[in-house]
Amino acid sequence: MLPLKIENLAVSFPGLAAPVLSLDSLEIAAGSRVALTGGSGSGKSTLINIIAGLERIRAGRVFWGEQNLADLSEGRRDQWRAANIGLVMQDFHLFPGLSALENILLPARLSRVANAELVKRARTLFETVGLTRPDQHVETMSRGEMQRVAIARALLRKPGVIIADEPTASLDLESGEAVGDLLLSVAADAGSTLIIASHDQRLVERLDRRLSLKSGRIVADARLGEIAA
Amino acid sequence: MIRFILADLRRLWLGGAVVILLVALATALGVAVTLQERSLRLGSARAADKFDLVVGAAGSETQLILSSIFLQPAPLPLVDGAVLTKLAADPRVAWAAPVGFGDSYAGYPIIGTTTSLINGTTTGFADGKMFALEGEAVLGAAVDLSVGAEIKPMHGSAETGGHTHAGAAYKVVGKLQPTGTPWDRAILVPIQAVWHVHGLGAEHGHHEEDGHDHAAEGEGHHDEADAHAGGEAGQPEPVAHASEAQQPVAKYAFAIGSASSKHVEEEHHGSIDPDAPIVETFGEGMPGLPAILVKPKTIADAYRLRQEYRTGATLGVFPGEVLTGLYATLGDAKMVLSAVAAGSQGLVAAALVLVTVIHVGQRRRQIGALRAFGAPRSSVFLIVWLELFLLVALGIGIGFLVGLGAAHFGAQMFTAKSGVILPVGFTREDLRLAMILLGFAAVLAAVPALLAYRQSPAQALRA
């Protein structure tokens, strides 16, 4: 439930003349549901990394609420991300050899914040995402189930922001749709700001606002009302 | 976190097992060298412990110790029997005992000696009693015979083409408790029996007059004895039959002494009187002896005696000083082996660094994901570090055990051959080695951990 405000952001990589991402101003209201589209090389992934606090910000400011990510050191950014951002990725990044429940709890455990309450929440979330066997090892699950586990993991610490990077790209149509439903419903329940980068037109159409990127710049910013109009 | 590491290691168990194996082998090599060398030193020192001073004829100190204490068969120059008489009467001497060797039975050396030596160097009998008659024998603990057995001495040993003494036989009357020295493999008989088997020394009953003659003989050919000993030393194969071939008359030259036996008439030998009581007061006219073991009363006496018997025809030696010289050689050998072991450990360490750096490269995405989901950098560092450190530490632990096992195995083989018990065991020094190795492992494991720590999660995920 955090608003995003980006000012004068520029991201360049050594060896590249033009910046891969250049945003003079972007605001996303708290609790809104935003789709991020654009081809490869559009700067979409870079933007995701920046707003998730995965990449260092060298030029510009990125505010989530009152917090400017540019001010945080790498360690503090990790900490802040762990507490405020729920990440869902195309490749799930579940850890084999651990059960589904252990996977949900792993980041919290590694941050040494897992207490009995959090373990209980993990079990509840497990049911919320529609799974039944918390002790099942993740490598024996279907891809759709895996993404559900990943979503449960992202929600564990009640993040104010959920960022999903191509959450349905590696799923078949049916599970992709189910995962899309799940993301929308959990974000709505928690009131979290939801940002989804996706090529999946069916998923994108269900979001309130669509940002299109090309060559590191926003080329279209359409809101649901306008689309309907 | 531990569960995550265990799950990770389970997944990568084959690679982990190879790492453990490599580390274990490299460690075991170094540990085995250290343990073996130390146990050899300790074992030989303990074997020589009971023997304070050895007096022999002038010649090689090392050979004197090897023959008299480690019972390695080799011809020794003989020391005049009168030296024993003088030593036995010396007030500074607790006991002095001759050793006569050269015969064997079933691969066990037969040693002629006295009851005082047996009493002075062993802890007592496991079975039976001390020999009291000329035809009786006492067994060392490691001799695979039992009380009541009959022993037909063979001159030299079977491997060196010895032959059995006709008509001579000992009856086993006792078996000693183990001492952990080569003497455990010896068959001990009265020295006078050895002399009589070889036709030396006093005839029983009227030994005084007879002995006189022998003494005169021994005296007269002393120079020859020395010359002969020198000649033998130059021969490539210093064993009994070699000298026999050259001097057919000196049939019993081996160890008992060629000069004295040279003049022995055929009818003299093979004649022990099994029922004759043993006489251990050595008077005049004794045959020459390869070595005399002396127990001085005090340490000061030991030094004085050694000094006195280092002049002219005799050689007084502390076994310890000879062993120290041998240890220096052993130490050199150990240094070479240790360098080889260290080299192999270095190679393994380098291989490990290579493997883990590649491994971390392959796991970049996983590590990046861990970070992305909020695992602190310290946790990532700890995970990578712990995984590698656990493997290497396990390898070091197993290596120490394997090294210990190998050293035990080597020691057992050595004991079976020589009778010297080699005490294999860890000491504080090994603890230090283990600590150093573990410390090194900790530093080694930090290399990939640091790589993982420094890697940006966004970059890692892009990979």
Image (cartoon, coloured by chain):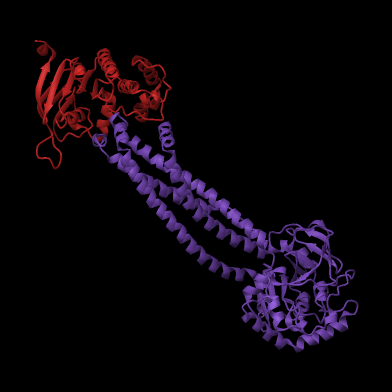
Chain colours: A red, B purple
Vertical side of B385 occupied by B110: above or below: below
Question: Which quadrant of the figure contains the C terminus of chain B?
Answer: top left
Q: Quadrant of residue B323 in the image?
A: bottom right
**Is residue B14 depicted above or below A31 in this figure?**
below
Residue B203 visible in the picture: yes
Q: Position of residue B307 (x, y in %)?
A: 65, 78
Task: Give the tally of numbered discs.
Answer: 0
* Above-or-below relation of B97 to A218: below
- Please give left or right for residue B335 compared with residue B43 in the image: left
- The residue depicted at 37 percent of the width and 39 percent of the height is B384
Q: Residue at x 22, y 28 (%)?
A: A52
Question: Camera-side residue: A187 or B361?
Answer: B361
In front here: B360 or A5?
Answer: B360
Residue found at the far front of this picture? A173
Residue A167 percent location from the top left of the image: 26, 23
* Quadrant of image for the N terminus of chain B: top left
Q: Is residue B94 visible?
A: no
Say left or right for A229 vs A182.
left
Residue A214, by quadrant, is: top left
In the rendered image, residue A33, in percent from the top left (x then y), is placed at 19, 17
Q: Who's the residue at 15% across and 30% down the image?
A: A43
Picture coordinates of residue B386, whole percent (x, y): 40, 40
